[in-house]
């Protein structure tokens, strides 16, 4: 089996920016390494779930991995900090002080005034004990069916690299090996070199290395298209240039579009490219939102891209 790298650039797609001569940050970025690969890649556009849908972070990343099940965000918040057991009862509350509750299995301070309470089992009496607190969410934890775990579903072994803890919790839930590369920040000043070295060092242990880079999304939320363009150029120079000779199949896409004008997720599709020796490449010379629509992949639902990618490895 060939070796593949699946690169997810968070919030990659964008609006046309007047100050960038009515181009998106991706269109205007100088990215010679990506654009050299794209000439020999199958390209297209991905919609998350359906046209017009504004995707959330977790659902869009699950979709790229081929999953579209209903989920509760509370589970992934808790998995950031703890291993969970089947049928544990999770409750998210708001409290100005540390809650004192009997029979609690564990407690997580998620952020200021937000706590996740974990109980061994659901009990109606628990809700009564929490009357003085504002309950924001509650759910019962269920493991994913074994046959649906990533390795069992696709018959490949994968490693997921990210500096975002909530994204690593997705890998944890799907039982994908995961790692936060040393020195990575999860911020706009990302250590891209560390991602490339971790990917190369683990190449022979796994069939697929997932690399999730959060920085483009952060800069979009900050409404800074110029820095978003710059981080895309840095990704090209310090990540793509470094790893491109080590992998047989290279996929680059985004998990959703994030507008640098509106500062939020938008429903616009994201570009995708798959480079491999088996690619039926077309005439795309610039990896961008408006050029990739002319590619041989066409317009796809995001949950289908993982199957196409894995087929290239075999």
Image (cartoon, rainbow, N blue to C red):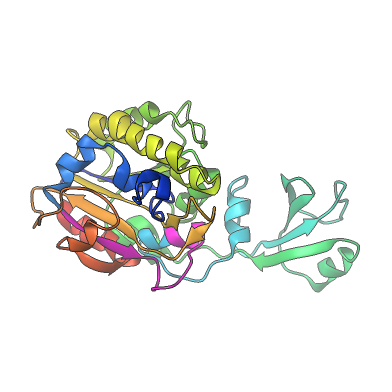
On screen, residue 39 above or below 56? above
- Taking the image as shown, residue 208 lies to the left or right of residue 11, namely left
* Residue at the (66%, 61%) spot, across then down: 88
Residue 84 is inside the magenta segment: no
For residue 96, side relative to residue 156 (left or right): right
Answer with the quarter of the image where residue 66 lies.
bottom left
* Total numbered labels: 0
Provide the residue span drawn in magenta: 42-60
Q: Residue 281 lies in what quarter of the image?
A: bottom left
Residue drawn where x is 24% and y is 49% of the image: 287
Q: Tell me residue 152's x, y (percent).
A: 33, 59
In the figure, residue 89 lies in which quadrant? bottom right
Q: Nearer the viewer, residue 201 or 250?
A: 250
Q: Is residue 58 rendered magenta in the image?
A: yes
Q: Residue furthest right?
A: 132
Of the pair 230 and 12, the residue shown nearer to us: 230
Image check: 100 left or right of 36? right
Q: Residue at x 48, y 53 (%)?
A: 170
Residue name at image x 32 percent, y 63 percent: 46
In x, y percent, where is residue 26? 33, 46
Viewer can see residue 107: yes
From the viewer's perspective, tell me whether residue 217 is left or right of residue 253.
right
Q: Position of residue 53 (x, y in %)?
A: 46, 71
Residue in front for this viewpoint, 248 or 33: 33
């Amino acid at each position: 089996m060939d070796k593949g790298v699946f690169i997810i650039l968070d919030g990659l797609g964008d609006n046309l920016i007047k100050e960038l001569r009515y181009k998106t940050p991706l269109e205007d970025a100088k990215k010679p390494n990506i654009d050299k690969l794209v000439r020999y890649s199958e390209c297209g556009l991905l919609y998350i779930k359906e046209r017009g849908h504004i995707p959330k972070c977790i659902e869009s990343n699950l979709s790229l991995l081929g999953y579209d099940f209903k989920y509760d965000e509370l589970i992934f918040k808790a998995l950031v900090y703890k291993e969970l057991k089947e049928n544990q009862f999770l409750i998210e509350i708001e409290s100005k002080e540390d809650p004192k509750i009997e029979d609690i299995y564990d407690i997580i301070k998620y952020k200021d005034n937000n706590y996740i309470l974990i109980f061994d089992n659901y009990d109606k009496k628990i809700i009564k004990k929490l009357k003085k607190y504002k309950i924001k969410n509650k759910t019962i934890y269920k493991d994913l069916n074994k046959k649906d775990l990533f390795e069992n579903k696709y018959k490949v072994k994968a490693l997921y690299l990210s500096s975002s803890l909530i994204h690593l919790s997705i890998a944890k839930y799907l039982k994908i090996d995961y790692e936060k590369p040393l020195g990575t920040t999860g911020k706009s000043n990302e250590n891209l070199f560390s991602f490339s070295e971790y990917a190369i060092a683990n190449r022979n242990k796994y069939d697929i290395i997932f690399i999730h880079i959060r920085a483009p999304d952060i800069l979009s939320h900050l409404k800074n298209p110029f820095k978003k363009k710059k981080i895309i150029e840095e990704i090209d120079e310090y990540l793509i240039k470094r790893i491109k000779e080590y992998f047989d199949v290279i996929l680059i896409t985004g998990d959703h579009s994030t507008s640098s004008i509106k500062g939020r997720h938008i429903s616009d599709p994201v570009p995708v490219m798959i480079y491999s020796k088996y690619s039926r490449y077309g005439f795309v010379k610039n990896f961008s939102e408006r050029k990739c629509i002319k590619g041989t992949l066409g317009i796809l639902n995001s949950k289908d891209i993982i199957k196409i990618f894995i087929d290239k490895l075999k």
